[in-house]
Image (spheres, rainbow, N blue to C red):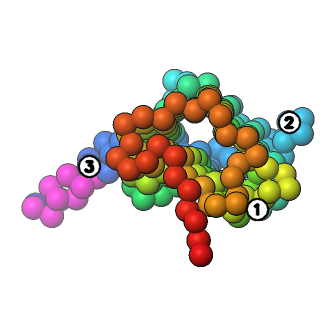
Amino acid sequence: MPRMILHSALLLLLLTSPVLAYESLQALYEQAEPSGEYDRYIELDPQTEYLGDLHVSVEENVRLIGNGALIHGRPYNISIGVFFGTLDVSNCVVIGGGYGIYFSTGASGSAFANTISGCSEYGISTIYQDEQIGVEIWDNIITDCQIGFYCIELHHPEYLDYNTIYSTTSYRYAEFCPD
């Protein structure tokens, strides 16, 4: 009898867990169809809450339109990230997680008109993005993160302007200068 109660309680806990209620951005990405110049075109429903676990694949050109939808980040993880691909992301509301939007090695694209809050590391980070193609960051609101915007010396975004960054625990804008 106690084992049955324990199993029932565990099942109830799993079914009511808020993380399970979020729709995965990665799953949407994998099902997304091409449109125009984009290999994958994703438009979010503002009535649905999403789990920030999107990792854009190598050499893909992706468009993500948030329409104000909430994207919940997971602790110490990247909510929206691109590696060796192109990502244009706008109108997303990212809450929590380690990194809000992350452009890594070989990445290009843009992040504009997004709201990012409560990231334990960086709101937006560009690390060794493709300087030939470039990354553009503008018109974002970033708050309550450790660092609002982070980049590497000599690897700045092609365009960085009109961002509102406040209530950071460390720096609004930070640049790492390796030796």
In this view of the protein, which residue sits in the foreground, 102 or 57? 102
Decide which of tag 2 and tag 1 comes sooner along the chain.
Answer: 2
In this view of the protein, which residue sits in the foreground, 113 or 157? 157
Q: Rate crowding at label 2 as few (under 14), some (14 to 19) or many (20 or more) other CA atoms within 10 Å.
A: few
Mark in front: 2 vs 3 = 2
Residue 106: which numbered mark, if any?
1
Q: Residue at x 47, y 43 (%)?
A: 172
Q: Give the residues in magenta.
A: 2-11
Q: Quadrant of residue 137?
A: top right
Magenta region includes residue 76: no
Q: Residue at x 60, y 55 (%)?
A: 151
Q: Does any portion of residue 149 appear in the rendered image?
A: yes
Q: Does any portion of residue 73 appear in the rendered image?
A: no
Q: Amino acid at mark 1?
A: Gly
Residue labelled with disc 2:
35
Q: Residue at x 90, y 35 (%)?
A: 36
